[in-house]
Amino acid sequence: MNTLLLKNNEHDIKLSAEILRTGGLVAIPTETVYGLAANALDGKAVEKIFKAKNRPMDNPLIVHIADIADIERFSLVSQFTENAKKLALAFWPGPLTIILKKGSSIPDEVSGGLDTVAIRFPSHKTAQAIIKEANIPLAAPSANLSGSPSPTSAQHVFDDLNGRIDAIVDGGECLVGVESTVITLAGDKPRLLRPGGITHEMLCKVLGEVEIDDAVLHKLAQGQRVLSPGMKYKHYAPKANVILLKGENDEFIKYVNKKSDNETAAICFEEDEKSLCCKTVIIGKSTDYETQAHRLFDCLRLIDKNKEIKTVYAHCPKTDGVGLALYNRLIRAAGFEVIDLEKI
Ligand code: TXA
Ligand code: MG
């Protein structure tokens, strides 16, 4: 298949909307990461997403809208609850996905056979323009091959999916850089399933208490029930072995320098780069979580470009604010391997 490379101009937005309306796959920019979109109301079109990404069929997709009214217009949920309305008012359009009991129009391919559906209203203008022009809700997972780091630029999408999808719309680099926060309102209590740019603290301000699902911070025990199927798969991992180091900056530098050889790299803070002897990729200043989130997946992909690298050391992030999203992604990239520098 020849993959069209499109820009975010009027002509190309019309063309991508047409491809989507007729059952094709288009990678679109959003403020979090690039999404691989298909018509959410067409099970056959959605099935192609799973094939293109090599994604397990039981991992459900997020449905993207460009107007809150689309939820009722397309019967996406069985009830748009009061808590959902509060969150929508506070954070939409933006990097928040809300899970509710699904409506009559959602095909099984979208919900992965669950009785719920995930809804998101992205703030990216190009994503909104494409959804509006197509005049359908779009199912879209991150536009990477399953298991590899999510794409935050059109080039990342091209590297993974060229020849496997109909088109890629280039909207520049994604601002947030980690996927949306996922919260479920389908259970007894609001529960955070995946941390992102909308933080746990921000959600609590609107809803009061919000539980953090076990899978956010910990490796699930074999056979443990998982609310968000995506959390059980190995994720975000470059080919090299990622190891997280927990401790102060100077301990990090000392440990990495002791261990480093030609096959070692470090994902490091800007201020530490000069002190490290191995190859480095800079993720941002130590105090700037936003930049670190924005850069994370690009750093993981950069490591893969150097085939010699076998081991990558990264700081274990603190878990407040956007730090929780960084921790959640890095701990998966590291296969939950953390070395506590104070204990060695
Ligand atoms: O920022 C984002 O959310 C990006 C952009 C493209 O919008 N999309 C994205 O999709 O990250 P994906 O498929 O890579 O991640 C969606 C996550 C998965 O972990 C999936 O298991 C979970 O959301 N999910 C989707 N529907 C669900 C549902 N009904 N119940 C529980 N978890 C659900
Ligand atoms: Mg993904």
Image (cartoon, rainbow, N blue to C red):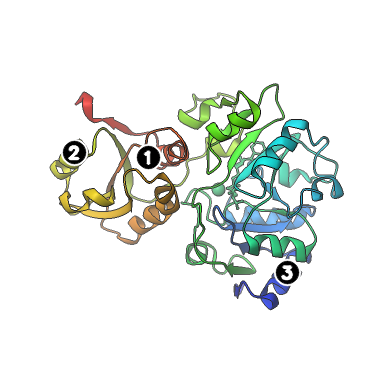
The answer to whether residue 261 is visible is no
- Under tag 1, what secondary structure? loop
Decide: is 94 above or below 192: below
**Ligand 1 located in image quadrant:** top right
Q: How many marks?
A: 3
**Disc sitting over residue 250 in the figure:** 2
Residue holding disc 3: 19
- Under tag 3, what secondary structure? helix
Of residue 281 and residue 235, the one placed in the foreground of this image is 281
* First-in-chain label (2 vs 1): 2
Quarter of the figure with the N terminus: bottom right
> Measured from the top left, where is residue 343 in percent x and y?
22, 24
> Measured from the top left, where is residue 242 in percent x and y?
33, 43
* First-in-chain label (3 vs 1): 3
Residues under labels 2 and 3: Cα distance? 53 Å
Q: Residue at x 67, y 23 (%)?
A: 189
Quarter of the rendering containing residue 229: top right
* First-in-chain label (2 vs 3): 3
Query: Which of the two marks, 2 or 1, is nearer to us in this view?
Result: 2
Pointers 3 and 1 in contact (C-beta within 8 Å): no
Of residue 218 and residue 342, the one placed in the foreground of this image is 342
Amino acid marked by disc 3: Ile
**Disc sitting over residue 334 in the figure:** 1
Label 2 packing within 10 angstroms: few (<14), some (14-19), many (20+): few
